[in-house]
């Protein structure tokens, strides 16, 4: 990048990305489409400004303030471990008070009736939401739909006026690495700000990021408060929702991530169809392909994701996919990692037909299948456990792929899962949590709720309960 810096300067040091691209056009092998997009026709054309794009897009980008009330310890000694022990063990009530916490972010108006898209983490658990338009008008808003996995939320302005500016949704699949983009938002709450950059990469999963979204990466400066703001192309279309940054000091270092606009379109369609977020479930467990695995599979280079397991009650099983198959592409879009596969499937709905490009035993082939929702098999049989046993007060259910997806668990897991622990039940003393899976009682495997009730009904004074949590097993002994 340092060697190219001289190319980017013109005259008194003005940044001229269009000139750089125009020079590149003289190089052999450039695609004709790229030449048509960037040829400067005059010196005036070379001196580009982003102002027309900003005038078009900025009015539809709003600032969002969400407020929620939380109870906190009001006693100055509450942070001291000794006094916390004193309050708890001797029954001395600790004073608590309600305090307001605010969260600042951004959003984008995507429909003329006042529908706004933002990040879910901007408005999660909010008691009230205030939206400030670019012209300083303020409105209250309510949440219509939240998607925690995609980190998207849709808000509806209360008493929305008729003259709202709207930012049209673009096609994020048409973006190329190197395309110019603008980020518009409210960083640090200082007011609407515009930064420029390029698409640094596509189909990225940031460190510790969500495995359900394949992000756009950009070097346009994104900072706290930009969350939920717009990433727009030079045609003034919304191509992404800014959502995260990679940083070591809390500020932008030129590595930002945006949710692609095509995923926003898919969730908007789900909202218009009634708000159901039940997405398609292929029913496979996959992993990325590295160099050693590519060589073992006979691939010329690492690409795609290899199937490790196929659920017997899934669309993949009905399409006769097998462990060892490599999924190379979905509907012609190349897959580079598990997040990329999840993202491509997340753009579709149950009942739609998709085409998979597979690599199987040295041969590339295509398979078509109809996507399905995760099955609710076995039926949940939700049960509140009662009686004289250690799990009294736990609400449990049979684990199915549908319930596992809802709870964020592995859909290949089976057995009985804890849904809730009541405040007064004995199970609360065991510190059970929603999502814990009850694996065994006194060494006997628990397969369903009926088997669990039978195991707890025995007149034993000592119970050994094996719990699965976060990929680890714990055995609790009571009695």
Image: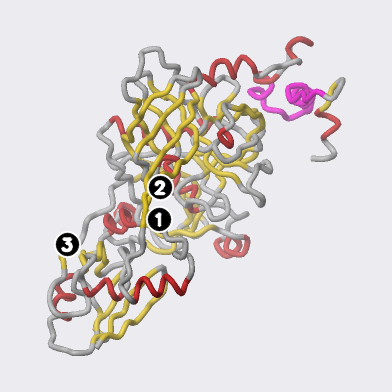
Q: Nearer the viewer, mark 3 or mark 2?
A: 2
> Which residue appears at 57% of the width and 54% of the height?
207
Task: State the separation of the CA atoms marked 1 and 2.
Answer: 7 Å
Whether residue 370 is visible here, answered yes or no, is no
Q: Is residue 463 above or below residue 206?
A: below
Camera-side residue: 465 or 34? 465
Question: What secondary structure is marked by label 1?
Answer: strand
Q: Earlier in the sequence, mark 1 or mark 2?
A: 1
Task: State the separation of the CA atoms marked 1 and 3.
Answer: 34 Å
> How would you rate the neighbour count of disc 3 (Cα within 10 Å): few for under 14, some for 14-19, many for 20 or more?
some
- The residue to which callout 2 is attached is 99
Camera-side residue: 135 or 473? 135
Camera-side residue: 291 or 43? 43
Question: What secondary structure is marked by label 3?
Answer: loop
- Picture coordinates of residue 65 (x, y %)? 45, 35
> Which residue appears at 32% of the width and 25% of the height?
158
- Picture coordinates of residue 49 (x, y %)? 69, 17
- The residue to which callout 3 is attached is 382
Per the rendered image, the range of residues in magenta is 14-35
Question: What secondary structure is marked by label 2?
Answer: strand
Whether residue 427 is visible here, answered yes or no, is yes
The reply to whether the magenta stretch includes residue 235 is: no
- The residue to which callout 1 is attached is 72
Q: Quadrant of residue 258?
A: top right
Q: Are marks 1 and 2 in contact (CB under 8 Å)?
A: yes
Q: Earlier in the sequence, mark 3 or mark 2?
A: 2
């Amino acid at each position: 990048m340092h060697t190219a810096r001289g190319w980017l300067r013109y005259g008194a040091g003005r940044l001229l990305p269009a000139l750089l691209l125009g020079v590149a056009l003289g190089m052999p092998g450039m695609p004709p489409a790229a030449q048509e997009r960037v040829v400067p026709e005059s010196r005036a054309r070379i001196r580009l400004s982003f102002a027309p794009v900003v005038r078009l897009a900025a009015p539809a980008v709003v600032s969002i303030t969400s407020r929620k009330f939380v109870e906190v310890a009001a006693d100055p000694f509450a942070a001291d471990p000794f006094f916390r022990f004193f309050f708890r063990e001797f029954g001395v009530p600790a004073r608590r008070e309600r305090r307001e916490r605010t969260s600042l972010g951004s959003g984008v108006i995507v429909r003329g009736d006042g529908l706004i898209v933002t990040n879910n983490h901007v408005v999660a658990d909010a008691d009230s939401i205030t939206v400030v338009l670019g012209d300083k008008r303020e409105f209250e808003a309510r949440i219509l739909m939240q998607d925690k996995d995609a980190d998207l939320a849709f808000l509806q302005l209360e008493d929305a006026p008729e003259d709202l500016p709207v930012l049209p949704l673009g096609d994020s699949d048409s973006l190329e690495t190197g395309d110019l983009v603008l980020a518009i938002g409210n960083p640090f709450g200082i007011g609407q700000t515009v930064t420029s950059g390029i698409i640094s990469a596509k189909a990225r999963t940031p460190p510790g990021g969500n495995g359900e979204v394949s992000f756009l990466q950009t070097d346009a400066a994104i900072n706290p408060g930009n969350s939920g703001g717009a990433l727009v192309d030079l045609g003034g279309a919304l191509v992404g929702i800014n959502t995260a940054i990679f940083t070591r000091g809390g500020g932008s270092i030129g590595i930002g991530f945006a949710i692609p606009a095509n995923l926003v379109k898919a969730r908007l369609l789900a909202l218009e169809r009634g708000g159901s977020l039940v997405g398609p479930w292929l029913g496979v467990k996959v992993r990325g392909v590295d160099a050693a695995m590519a060589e073992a599979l006979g691939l010329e280079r690492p690409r795609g994701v290899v199937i490790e397991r196929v659920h017997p009650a899934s669309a993949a099983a009905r399409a006769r996919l097998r462990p060892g198959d490599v999924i190379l592409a979905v509907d012609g879009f190349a897959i580079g990692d598990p997040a990329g596969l999840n993202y491509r499937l997340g753009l579709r709905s149950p009942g739609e037909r998709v085409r998979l490009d597979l690599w199987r035993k040295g041969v590339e082939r295509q398979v078509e299948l109809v996507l399905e929702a995760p099955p609710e098999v076995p039926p949940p049989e939700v049960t509140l456990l009662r009686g004289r046993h250690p799990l009294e007060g736990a609400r449990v259910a049979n684990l199915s792929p549908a319930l596992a997806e809802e709870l964020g668990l592995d859909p290949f897991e089976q057995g009985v899962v804890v849904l809730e622990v009541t405040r007064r039940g004995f199970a609360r003393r065991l510190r059970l949590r929603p999502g814990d899976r009850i694996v065994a009682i006194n060494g006997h495997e628990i397969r369903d709720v009926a088997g669990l009730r039978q195991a707890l009904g025995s007149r034993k004074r000592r119970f050994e309960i094996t719990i699965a949590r976060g990929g680890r097993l714990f055995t609790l002994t009571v009695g």
